[in-house]
Amino acid sequence: VGRTLDAGDRFGTRSGRFAWLAACAIGLVFAFGAARLRRLELAFALHLGMRRRDVVGLLCLELILVLVPTVSLSLIGTVTWLQGQGWPHLWPFGLAVIAAGALGAVLGVIVAGVCVSQRRVMTYLKAR
């Protein structure tokens, strides 16, 4: 028709170009918040002699138990929906968003585990 296609420009200006960043931020906030709700339990475990890396490891293990089914179902749903729409070539972008959300959740749990302070057990208890 006489037109040229600038695929790089169209790809760079698409509406979902920051979806991975939003997924990462949402995963970080929710995981941090979920771990923060347990700060009294975690601080008391530190007070009883549990090492910080063990607390963070426990939080990561609990997160993995939640993330495996969540990521699996999200991946299956994304691939199925994109293939049903006739866009099977877009599944790597869906995978990137799912992976970014999972990475954000892992980072949120690690940050929350590191931020818990053993000295603030009484403060956490009074706030409860």
Image (cartoon, rainbow, N blue to C red):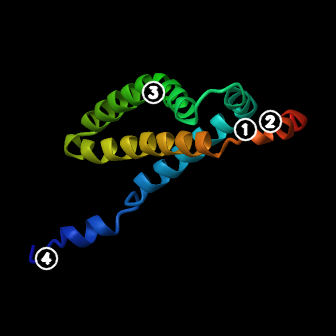
User: Which structural element holds mark 3?
Assistant: helix
Please name the residue that numbered disc 3 is placed on.
Answer: 64
Earlier sequence position, callout 4 versus callout 3: 4
Q: Tell whether 47 sits left or right of 91.
A: right
The image position of residue 19, as x and y in percent, is 43, 54
Q: Which label number is shown at residue 3?
A: 4
Residue occupying image coordinates x 45% and y 27%:
64
Determine crowd level at label 2: few under 14, some 14-19, many 20+ residues with C-alpha closer than 10 A: many
Q: Are marks 2 and 1 in contact (CB under 8 Å)?
A: yes
Q: Earlier in the sequence, mark 3 or mark 2?
A: 3
Q: Residue at horizontal 70%, vertical 25%? A: 48
Q: Which residue is mark 2?
A: 121
- Give the residue type that dot 1 points to: Gln
* Residue type at numbered disc 3: Ile
Residue 84 against residue 10 in the figure, above or below: above
Q: Which residue is mark 1?
A: 118
Contact flag, marks 1 and 4 (Cβ < 8 Å)? no
What type is the residue that disc 2 sits on? Answer: Val
Distance from disc 3 to disc 2, alpha carbons, whole Å, reads 27 Å
User: Marks 3 and 1, Cα distance to the nearest angstrom?
Assistant: 25 Å
Q: Which mark is residue 43?
A: none
Q: Say which label, 3 or 1, has the lower sequence index.
A: 3
State the separation of the CA atoms marked 1 and 4: 66 Å
Question: Tag 3: Cα neighbours inside 10 Å, few (<14), some, or many (≥20)?
Answer: some
Query: Element at badge 4?
Result: loop
Three-letter code for the amino acid on which mark 4 is drawn: Arg
Residue 8 higher or lower than 18, as above or below? below
- With respect to residue 80, does 1 lie above or below? below
Characterize the local packing of mark 1: few (<14), some (14-19) or many (20 or more) Cα atoms within 10 angstroms: some
The image shows residue 106 at horizontal and vertical percentages of 48, 40
C-alpha separation, residue under disc 2 versus residue under disc 1: 6 Å
Front-lying residue, 91 or 107: 107
